[in-house]
Amino acid sequence: MADDRLGQILGQLRSRGGRVTAPRRAIITALLDAGEHVTAEELVDAVKLMDPEIHLSTVYRTLETLTDLGVVDHVHLGHGPAVYHLSDDAHYHLVCYHCGSIIELPPDAFDALGDRFQRDYGFRLDARHFALGGHCRACA
Amino acid sequence: MADDRLGQILGQLRSRGGRVTAPRRAIITALLDAGEHVTAEELVDAVKLMDPEIHLSTVYRTLETLTDLGVVDHVHLGHGPAVYHLSDDAHYHLVCYHCGSIIELPPDAFDALGDRFQRDYGFRLDARHFALGGHCRACA
DNA sequence: TTAGCTGCAAAAGGTTTGCAAATTA
DNA sequence: TAATTTGCAAACCTTTTGCAGCTAA
């Protein structure tokens, strides 16, 4: 089934006139294997186990292409590097300013607030791209 | 009254064993004059009109000192540089991913959500440090 | 006097870009 | 063949840091 997903993504790539290359195959595979948030750096490390030639800039470029394709998204959890994940795994993030721990929120966590912003400001909230900060139970 | 505020901040600085210097005076004045969000870059430009010698790194260091003092806060509105403002002007931000326009929210905007996160996860939300993204009316 | 600041230059960290060579379709 | 990707090196942008000299208290 991971293979299905891989084939499906490669198909999307081709149908846009993109090429299927060894680096891209490796990067998408690593992304599917990771199963959760990974930084570009972590991804290149994983990918280098399959092919040590693959360069970080190729990872960034592929990630960008996959983002355009709507297959990948990235989230800013804080001051450090962005983390990437497959778009079908949509969720929100709470990050502790003190210890950095992350709480994942269900997709409906902002429905009420989103409705209110829509009504009050005509603003369509999408709080997925930046995490929300605060202090977790242990650090409160 | 801006002078009052300046004197008050300088007093806080001194009471911590800090020194009152010409660069600091200029930076705080510029911050008070700005009245709203400014980047470190914008701040150094404003400050250089008073004293062209003042260096960007001094601005960053002063901003850090004032943050420790609880006088200044900074917010990340998106991918660019952080913006700084006086702490007594507390509010939240909605940023349009498309056009970058900013909506300022009143200090109680997240009360309900914060209570819910507190209850459900023991997480004390503080959504001031990173803006929330979405699409404004014009870009929806 | 002396702890604390400053300017400057350099580095750090994450990401992007120019380019010529390699590869896909 | 023609268009797309790649690796590499270098640039980019914001912020931080090391250091020697300067200055406020």
Image: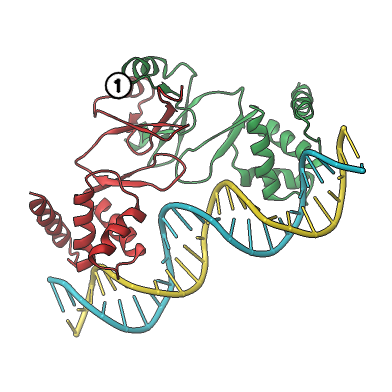
Chain colours: A red, B green, C cyan, D yellow
Does residue A7 appear left or right of residue C20 in this picture? Answer: left
* Residue B131, x across and y down, in percent: 44, 33
Which amino acid, by three-letter code, is at mark 1? Asp
Placement of B18 over or under A13, stated as above or below: above
The image quadrant that residue A101 belongs to is top left
| Residue A123 placement, left or right of B80 | left
Q: Residues within 10 Å of mark 1 (few under 14, many from 20)?
A: some
Examine the rendered structure and indicate whether residue A70 appears above or below residue A44: above
Who is closer to the viewer here, B36 or A70?
A70
The image quadrant that residue B109 belongs to is top left
Residue B135 shows in the view:
no
Q: Helix, strand, or loop for circle 1?
A: helix
Q: Tell me the residue at 63%/32% (across/down).
A: B67
* Residue A28 as seen in the image, left or right of residue D24: left
On screen, residue A29 versus residue B42, left or right, reads left
Q: Which residue is mark 1?
A: A115
Image position, residue A27 (x, y; %)? 24, 59
